Amino acid sequence: MTRSRRAHYLAAIVLLTGMFYTMMLWPPAPIPQKINMMLVCNQEPIESMAQQRTWKSWSHDYIDKVDFPVGWELTHYRLGSLGAKTNIFLDLRTIMSSQDGGEYEYTVITDYFSLSEIMISINGKPIGSHKGDLVESRFVAHLAPGDNLLEINYIQTVGLNSLKVFYRPLNSKRTYYVGQDSDRTHFAPAPFARAQQRMSAAIVYPSA
Amino acid sequence: MKQKHLVLLAYTSIILIASYFIYFRNYHIPEDTLWDEIYTISSAYSYINREARVEYHPPLGLAFIALGEVLLQPNSTVETQGLSKAIDVGAIPPGFSFKGVRFFPALLGSLCPLLFFILLYLSVPNIHFAGLFSSLYLFDNALIVQSRGAHLEGMQLFFILMGLSCFVYIVTRGNFSKAAYACLGFLVGLAIIIKVNSAILLILPIAAGAMQYTTGCSRRKAIARISIALAIPAAIVLLAMLKMHLLAAPLQNEQPPGVKRYFNQMTSMNPAAFDRLAKVMPQNDANASHPMSWPVGHKSIQYRWSTDMKNSRFVYFQGNPAAWWVGFCAIVMGIALVIARYVFGLDPHSKKIFFMIQTYVLVYAVYIITLVFVDRALYLTHYMIPLVLSFLVAYLLFCYIFFKEIANKSKAVYCAAAFYVVQLFAVYVFFSPLSYYHELSRRDFNRRAWNNLWELHYDQEP
């Protein structure tokens, strides 16, 4: 390596680190203060409005396992804060592939002192739901061999936010997070459909 | 020559002024305890109230903290009589000002960047690069936070940097006189009686002696010089300070027998006193981290937290990643260089620089490996000495690798170093709200959590 090359390599490295720090330090684009929203009921718009943004309205994040620790603000252990405190509708969808199929037990753990509603569906069929001050609930469902669409709907109005969902093949003693692969069960992201095409409950979402 | 002195003076002035604003200004904020301050302030007040008690740390740093309080007297109207027992009470009296107790730690801490610059300049006398690389110390947020509180590390690093300067003076100038060794031992001794982990620097006189031996000096003479540096000044300082400790806080007849027995054991160097001290050390703590994970910044410590529900304020022990990552890379490269020398027979083109690199890498490695086997909870705050050594290795490696370019005054090398300083400064500013107790929203806070290993948490930690 010649002298000049060595110095230029150094300059290139410092330039790259400079680009990295610029990227990390650059302030994010300001969030528009006003958002347009639409209330939808049974797939029909019932009201449109514009209001000051006080919460993060809509977010699609791929998470690796359903593990939201207890807190006032919905927080994922890896993604960090998801920017919502109350009146949250969390729609989790994943493809759960079972190699042999069989009976699976699902355990849902939420926080104390809050009004939450949780519903778990497999291939569009609800397998269990719970309203009110829920601590821990278990549901058992049969999974066909191959791909199954697993949906978890979590509605939070007031109180703390927390959600942990586990699964366990009934013939196994070990419990896994939903999203965490086991020997014969694997997860893959499921594409999100537009909410109003699927949901019968009233939801709030920003209009296009 | 005159121009060189002017440039030196300019760098000194710039560093001193910057240090004042970064390390010293408003050092009394926040007006509440940070991290271990409750212990150090309580210990300092045991000197002020002339009460003997069992201390976790040697007396010099605590005496400095007490001296600041006595000199400035910012709490003359506050009821402070019970402060020496504040650990039990668990609170600082309302209206207590931290101007006195944080004065000497902040003052000596703010002089450290200048000492670091002098140390770099003594190591490789290139004013511009020494000035630029002193930014590693100047803009490190962890060093800033630790130096601005009534903690021991700011004062400890002051004497450590002086000791290192003395070591570099001996090695680079070839001045192996008794006085130089005695001075080195004295400065290391002062650092030790601030915090015991400074004892790792006792490797320095041994290294200097080894270098003296390689220059043709007899083995007996080298060992005699090492002995001077190791034994006499350290012993004098240790005994003098122990005596000062007892004079400042004399044992009274009404003193609890446990305290009296402790001092009797200490003065007779009875190991039972040290055993008892070891038993009260914390074994498990949520803030504790493994020494091997410190180079990557695992894990930050929340010193202070307050919120008004919308935003929160923090003092976080969080380093400047632009500085820490360079330090970490420097240590890895330093180890590689040492292996290349002793395993693959590389012939270093600058023996003095290589000698300093290998000494610092050795001290770094011995320090970390020793702490791995220490049976108590350890914190990232214990990484201060190796961190400074990693900065030194970074500078020395830079000068070692680019010696020809530096000699030829290559513009690319100068520009790269200057641009790196700009990056250091920008990252320091970005993380400074965590150092100076500024308000941050959750969103802004999360923008600073670059790495899960740091474990930065917006909410108050349990």
Image: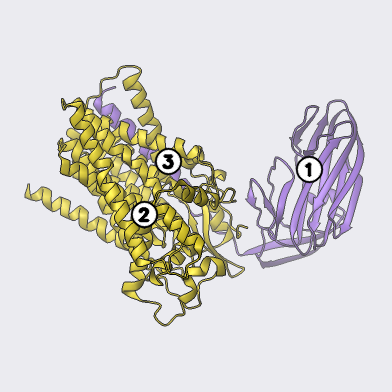
Q: Position of residue B450 (x, y in %)?
A: 52, 47
Whether A23 is drawn above or below B29: the answer is above
Q: Position of residue B45 (x, y in %)?
A: 42, 69
Chain ID at mark 2 = B
Q: Are marks 2 and 3 in contact (CB under 8 Å)?
A: no
How packed mark 3 is, by other alpha carbons closer than 10 Å (few <14, some 14-19, many 20 or more), is: some
Note the chain letter of the purple one: A
Chain ID at mark 1 = A
> What residue did someone put label 3 on?
B325
Q: Nearer the viewer, mark 2 or mark 3?
A: 2
Q: Amino acid at mark 1?
A: Arg
Disc sitting over residue A93 in the figure: 1
Q: Are marks 2 and 1 in contact (CB under 8 Å)?
A: no
Note the chain letter of the yellow one: B
CA gap, disc 2 to disc 3? 28 Å
Q: Amino acid at mark 3?
A: Trp
Disc sitting over residue B194 in the figure: 2
